[in-house]
Image: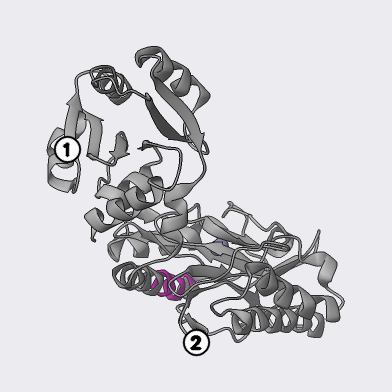
């Protein structure tokens, strides 16, 4: 990863704002900018250079991983070390404005920091700047995401070997999660969703101890983190022989998902991608059962920008990686969702998820 280039791009952007520097506190942003993968640290990026503050637990790791920034190992908290660092700064005629990541920096930390730094250092809330850079993935990131997606698809194949009526949802999740670890995953990107029967109508039904009934849908939504990058995939299978109304719901969702995928191309607003899926479900009379948004960005985090939702004006660009995951949910009855990850390409998009979307009955 070219961490120095990423920091340079950030500096070039900061030069166009009122911020002299940005205090990066959100760990995925820190990882993106300098490569640090630990759980405690602060990265100060200024025009003159970058400084990374962490504590003694990460002494060795920070020196191994951090690129493009001076490493400061704090004997106390990283925030206190940062305060000392800024306090020692020579006076500038116009003071210094440091941006804080408003979406992540706590009010308590802001209060603490403001007590540590002299008055001439102004702390101001900054918008999500690094997140905007992270939306567009470079070739190396796309390759890592493809590896994560491939492993994600593989663990679903393992899940299908055990998914039967009478088997507990958590047992299916356990087999998939074991396969993920065996495949090198650091962890799951979120708690595995295996939601069967009426639970499939819960869009986020985590695997429970309920036994999978027959004559029921099972929504399986899962993902792995491999080399830092997340995968996210949903398939819905039927247990038993498929009744007509179940097949109709499934095919409507599949058609909506396909329509949204076909809408993905550079220059289109994400709201239009959402509308493409919604239009199909409305036509099938299922519009009011599609209760969530169509998708989201994926990368170092499972949910990133852009939000692929109604009315959102963010415009797709080559290199963005998003999910397309429409679903319909009938409370007390069942739910269906189909989710792929796609990468926006010059001419449209590449569907990364390899798993078949034909309705599978087990
Ligand atoms: Zn998902
Ligand atoms: Zn998702």
99 drawn magenta: no
Residue 203 coordinates in the image, percent (x, y): 67, 58
Residue 169 coordinates in the image, percent (x, y): 56, 59
For the record, the magenta segment spans: 152-159
Residue that label 1 marks: 70
Picture quarter containing residue 339? bottom right
Residue that label 2 marks: 347
Q: Secondary structure at mark 1?
A: strand
Residue at image position (23%, 20%) is 90
Q: Secondary structure at mark 2?
A: loop
Q: Outermost residue toward the right?
A: 285
As drawn, 113 above or below 301: above
Q: Is residue 239 visible?
A: yes
Residue at image position (28%, 53%) is 8
What is the crowding at mark 1: few (fewer than 14 residues within 10 Å), some, or many (at least 20)?
some
Instruction: Specify the principal SS of the magenta part.
Output: helix
């Amino acid at each position: 990863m070219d961490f120095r280039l990423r920091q340079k791009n950030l500096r070039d952007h900061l030069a166009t704002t009122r911020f002299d520097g940005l205090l990066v506190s959100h760990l995925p942003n820190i990882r993106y900018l300098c490569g640090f993968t630990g759980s405690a640290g602060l990265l100060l990026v200024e025009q003159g250079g970058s400084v990374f503050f962490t504590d003694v637990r990460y002494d060795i790791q920070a020196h191994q991983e951090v690129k493009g920034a001076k490493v400061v190992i704090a004997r106390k908290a990283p925030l206190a070390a940062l305060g000392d660092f800024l306090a020692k700064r020579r006076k500038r005629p116009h003071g210094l404005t440091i941006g804080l990541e408003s979406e992540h920096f706590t009010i308590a930390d802001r209060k603490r920091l403001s007590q540590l730094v002299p008055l001439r250092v102004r702390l101001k809330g900054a918008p999500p700047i690094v997140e905007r850079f992270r939306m567009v993935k470079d070739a190396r990131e796309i390759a890592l995401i493809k590896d994560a997606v491939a492993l994600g698809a593989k663990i679903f194949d393992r899940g299908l070997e055990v998914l039967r009526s009478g088997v507990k949802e958590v047992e299916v999740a356990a087999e998939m999660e074991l396969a993920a670890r065996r495949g090198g995953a650091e962890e799951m990107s979120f708690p595995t969703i295996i939601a069967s029967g009426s639970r499939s109508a819960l869009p986020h039904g985590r695997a429970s101890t309920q036994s999978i009934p027959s004559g029921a849908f099972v929504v399986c939504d899962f993902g792995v983190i491999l080399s830092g990058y997340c995968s996210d995939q949903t398939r819905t299978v039927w247990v038993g022989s498929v009744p007509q109304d179940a097949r109709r719901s499934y095919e409507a969702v599949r058609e909506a998902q396909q329509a949204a995928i076909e809408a993905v191309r550079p220059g289109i607003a994400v709201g239009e991608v959402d509308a493409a899926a919604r239009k199909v479900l409305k036509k099938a009379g299922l519009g009011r059962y599609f209760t969530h948004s169509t998708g989201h960005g994926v990368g170092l985090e499972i949910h990133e920008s852009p939000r692929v939702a109604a009315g959102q004006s963010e415009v797709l660009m080559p290199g963005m990686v998003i999910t397309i995951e429409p679903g319909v949910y009938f409370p007390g009855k069942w739910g269906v969702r189909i989710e792929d990850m796609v990468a926006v390409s010059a001419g449209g998009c590449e569907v990364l998820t390899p798993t078949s979307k034909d309705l599978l009955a087990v």
